[in-house]
Amino acid sequence: MSRRRLEEAILRSKELGSCGESLDGGSEEESAGTYSDLFVRHHVPLAKDSHGIYSLRFCPNGKLLAAGFGNGAIQTVNVGGGGADVTLYSGHRTRQAVTALSYHPGSQNLLVAAGADGIISVYDIQSQLNVFSLTEQGNEINALDFSLDGSVFGTAGRDRNIRLYDSHTHQILQTVEAPDSLNDDDVSLTSGHTRRIFALRFHPEEHHVFVTGGWDNSVKVWDKRITKEARSVIHGPHICGPGIDIKGDMVVTGSWVARNALQLWDLRSSGLLQDVPFPASSLQGEFLYAARFASDTIVLAGGSGTSSACAINFRTKEVLGEVCLPNKAVHTVDVSPGGHTAAVAGAGGNLHVAEFC
């Protein structure tokens, strides 16, 4: 029965076609312009806030936002109204945090969630049903993302292996196995990660390219057709959350370090393009967990140093706005397709929905 529902959800996603308009109905080209301000539209209280929010993801049309909580709960939010929509899973004391969420890129009805307990759950938003689940035994999943066409999604986490799944059958297509850290012969610059992975992001315009990053102070660029070794390596970023994003030939990283935490890199050469100044005092430090592109010139990033997220024009170095949590770490941020709306959340819940203008 659940397989039939899943197949129906996938069929609906194919029928939807183009569904990437921004919240205000503007085209992506219009919303990709230079913004001058970021203001908070809604502070959204949710029933599971006491467990903290560890993941956020806008649906493809930007009208719904999914939030994953520390007890495994998943709720959706109506972005326009700023209120709770539905509870897909109410959570349980035995469950762990939902650390990653990703919608099928062609549908606002198909959501995949992954957690620190290794459980991957597929939800049909329209029917509010969990239509499929599987478990990566012994793993804590920290990152999950769909490829451009939605045919594949990837996961990564504590065991350092990167798994690529067929999104229709949920069978593993390929595994990038972590090197044996006790055997130096197995470790090279282009081998898998040597410490746990916290971020995985597919390229939004290319079908096969994705990047990963974690505690080993590197971001690795992969081609899902050739996974024996990384295509290239960016050295330096210390990734401890969803702190990687891609825009064209640029990669933004948010590192959990005191200084120069927010950086832009050239995807082609793996070279540093620039350090992006993030406003933090010397006593606070920057310590970023999350980073996202909002446009060709703007990034949104946040973490535990300032208990806030800032939108920054990296060309002018101007801070367009700040979303502050009440002395709580920012765990996650997301930006809607087209870049018009942003979401920020973290410890204690504290979900804020903000708008660029």
Image (tube, rainbow, N blue to C red):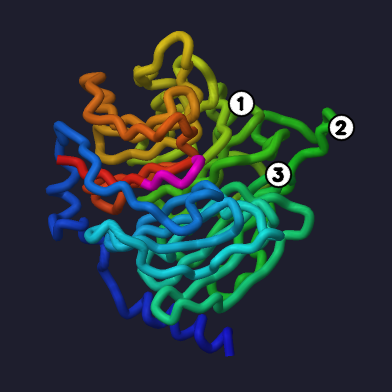
Q: Which mark is residue 183?
A: 2
Give the mark toward the camera: 1 or 3. Answer: 3
Spatial CA span between label 1 and label 3: 15 Å
Secondary structure under the numbered disc 2 in the rendered image: loop
Three-letter amino acid code of the residue under disc 1: Asn
Place of residue 350 in the rendered image (x, y in percent of width and height, measured from the top left): 41, 44
Magenta stretch in the rendered image: 347-351
Mark 1 crowd level (few <14, some 14–19, many ≥20, 10 Å Cα): some
Q: Earlier in the sequence, mark 2 or mark 1?
A: 2
Check the image and report above or below for 45 versus 310.
Answer: below
Check the image and report above or below for 174 versus 171.
Answer: above
Spatial CA span between label 2 and label 1: 19 Å
Three-letter amino acid code of the residue under disc 2: Asn
Asked if residue 201 lies left or right of residue 132, the reply is left
Residue wearing tag 1: 217
Q: Is residue 349 magenta?
A: yes
**Residue 115 seen:** yes
Q: Which mark is residue 158?
A: 3
Check the image and report above or below for 94 versus 283.
Answer: below
Q: Nearer the viewer, residue 8 or 174?
A: 8
Three-letter amino acid code of the residue under disc 3: Arg
